[in-house]
Amino acid sequence: MDSEVLLKDSFAYAQEALVGKWTRWAIFIVLALPFSLIQFVFDPKKISDGMKMGWDAIPWGRIVILFFLGIVLSFFISGYMVRIYRGVKPAPDFIGWTDLFIDGIKLAIVWFLWILPFLIVLLTGVAIAVIMYLSAPAAGPNIGMLLLVLLLILVALVLLVSVLLLGIIGAVRFARTGSVREGIRISAIVATIRTMGWLSYILALVIFAVTAIIYGIVTSVLSLIPYIGWVLVLIIAPFFSIFCARYFTLVYDQGVAQTVQPEAAV
């Protein structure tokens, strides 16, 4: 797996998708706008004086509306990513909005099913830790419960790594098959990764992680620019989203082509 080719192709794909396609870029920005506007509906200085929180000063109504609107519009963006996962080249336009929305919801379901075991284990550990904290003054530390919490944290970390390793391939597999069930079919996903090689796959993810860290640093610096920082972040975010989708698509294609050949020969 040539990492340099993956990066160059993904960058060129994102560039072709947006540069000169200003309407498409503007649609991305509008769809992501509600989440960006949440930061402007309240003044942190009026909510907290450094000693306590003034919960009554938080405009919950406007926050809930923007959050709900942001969730709804995010399904269109996710649906667009699904089309990229399908290997469409050049990048598609925003057409078939109903299908975009449905695909976005299905992709969210796939990721939810992947992350659900992790959430269950993590929340169970947190609940036990809270119970330990509340009961400690009266009964003293419970070594058994402490070991259980540590075990649950370890299991949660293993599950999180599994989600990252398998969920990415699962998301692209869902896009290719159109089936949520196929998006979480562990045996088929593992077979795809084995075909490309675990070491090659992990290396591709590490390179992507480095790229994501660089992007995070850049956006953090941009966000510090007064007045226009958040706008700049909003503008470059679509480029990175398309880059990610194309990168994962190319990684998936390294393994999927050969996976079905043995079955076809039977």
Image (spheres, rainbow, N blue to C red):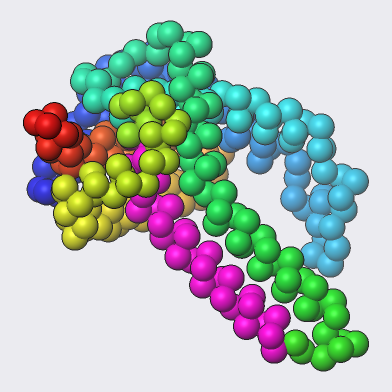
**Is residue 88 visible in this depiction of the protein?**
yes
Tell me the quarter of the picture where residue 144 sits: bottom right
Query: Could you tell me residue 107's position as x and y percent?
Result: 47, 31
In this rendering, the answer to whether 265 lies above or below 51 is above
Along the horizontal axis of the image, is 65 left or right of 32? Answer: right
Taking the spot 21% from the left edge, 20% from the top edge, the residue there is: 89
Q: Nearer the viewer, residue 185 or 6?
A: 185
Residue 172 is left or right of residue 220, and the answer is left
Question: In x, y percent, where is residue 257?
Answer: 14, 34
From the viewer's side, name the closer residue of 37 and 165.
165
| Residue at (51, 72) in percent of width and height | 154
Q: On the rendered structure, is 66 left or right of 258? A: right
Q: Quadrant of residue 53?
A: bottom right
Q: Looking at the picture, how far across and down is residue 134, in whole percent?
A: 85, 77
Quadrant (top left, top right, bottom left, bottom right) of the C terminus = top left
Q: What count of labels does the image hold? A: 0
User: Magenta region: which residues?
Assistant: 143-172
Q: Measured from the top left, where is residue 149 in percent x and y?
A: 64, 75
* 116 relative to 245, above or below: below
Q: Main secondary structure of the magenta part?
A: helix
Q: In this view, does 62 lie to the left or right of 157?
A: right
- Can you name the residue that lies furthest to the top here? 96
What residue is drawn where x is 70% and y is 81%?
145
Q: In this view, does 41 lie above or below 16?
A: below
Q: Does the magenta stretch include residue 154?
A: yes
Q: Can residue 247 be seen in this view?
A: no
Verify whether residue 258 appears in magenta.
no
What residue is drawn where x is 25% and y is 57%?
Answer: 202
